[in-house]
Image (cartoon, rainbow, N blue to C red):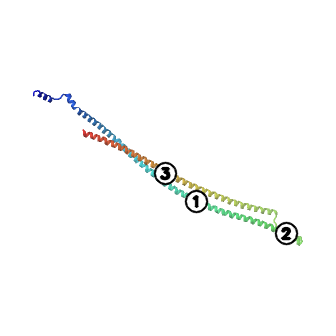
Amino acid sequence: MEEAKPKQAAAREPLPRELSGRRDMPLVEELERLRAELAAAKARLAATTAEIPRLKTLIESTNGAVAKGQEEERRKQAALDALRRRLAGLGRGQDDALRRVLSELTAARGAKDALERRALVRRQVARALRLAERALAAEAHALAWSATAAAETLRLAAGAAGDEAALHHDVVALPARTHEELRRAVEAEERRAEARVEEAEAARRAARARRAAAVARLDAARARRREAAEAGQDRHGRDADDMRQRRGKMEKGRGQTRGRLGSRARLVVKKLGGFLCSKVRD
């Protein structure tokens, strides 16, 4: 019994400091680990808090870029509508120009026909005048020779010198000088008639030239209209391609921004979850 008492007393005595420190060592390490995790969670929370303003700025800039892209698209659409209205007005102006050219062409054709008719009438009149002048000259020569022959016959038949003078007063004869003057007058009239014919031909050629110029202006107006229509179609195609490219870039930028925002949001949620779990453990 006496030996058992010292053993029980020895069992109730406190352990040495070294042995008690060894027994409490796992708790201290756990506490230090928890403190380290808490500090890391606080650091992550601070980093996340610092990241939030930058994310807000990024979201605002993305929204601004989207609004700017939409405004640019509206401006492009307005410019395209204005271009369409301008092309429509240009088409109406081209139609007016075509109608004006056609009216000028019709007037030129009418003037040409009138000049051709006048030239034909003048040529016919000049030909008739020449024939009449030739007939009158031939008739005058015939009458002169007939009168001379008749007078000579009467003179020979009568045989009287006094009657010869009286008979010669009835003879219609033209002197050579008068005949030459008449011939020159006829030739001058023929030249004037030919000049009038040449004038009519020149007017006809001028009318043809005006008609050719009107046709050339009509062809040029049609060519300008075709070029304007083709240019409008090409410009419309380029604007449509630009709008599609811009829309594709905007959609791609939105997708990338959403992807970045989604990944960052998941990271923030994960960090907050870890921080809350560590706080619950504490």
Q: Residue 170: give x, y in percent of width and height.
A: 83, 70
The foreground one among 15 and 111 is: 15
Label 2 neighbour load within 10 Å: few <14, some 14-19, many 20+: few
Q: Residue 3: give x, y in percent of width and height.
A: 11, 27
Q: Are marks 1 and 2 in contact (CB under 8 Å)?
A: no
Instruction: Say which amino acid is labelled 3.
Output: Gly
At 72% from the left edge and 64% from the top edge, which residue is drawn?
A: 127
Q: Is residue 97 left or right of residue 75?
A: right
Which residue is identified by label 3? 237
Q: Are marks 1 and 3 in contact (CB under 8 Å)?
A: no
Instruction: Say which amino acid is labelled 2.
Output: Ala
Q: Residue furthest bottom?
A: 158
Q: Name which of mark 1 and mark 3 comes first in the sequence.
A: 1
Instruction: Say which amino acid is labelled 1.
Output: Leu
* Residue at disc 2, secondary structure: helix
Which residue is identified by label 2? 149
The vertical placement of 25 against 59, above or below, is above
Which residue is identified by label 1? 102
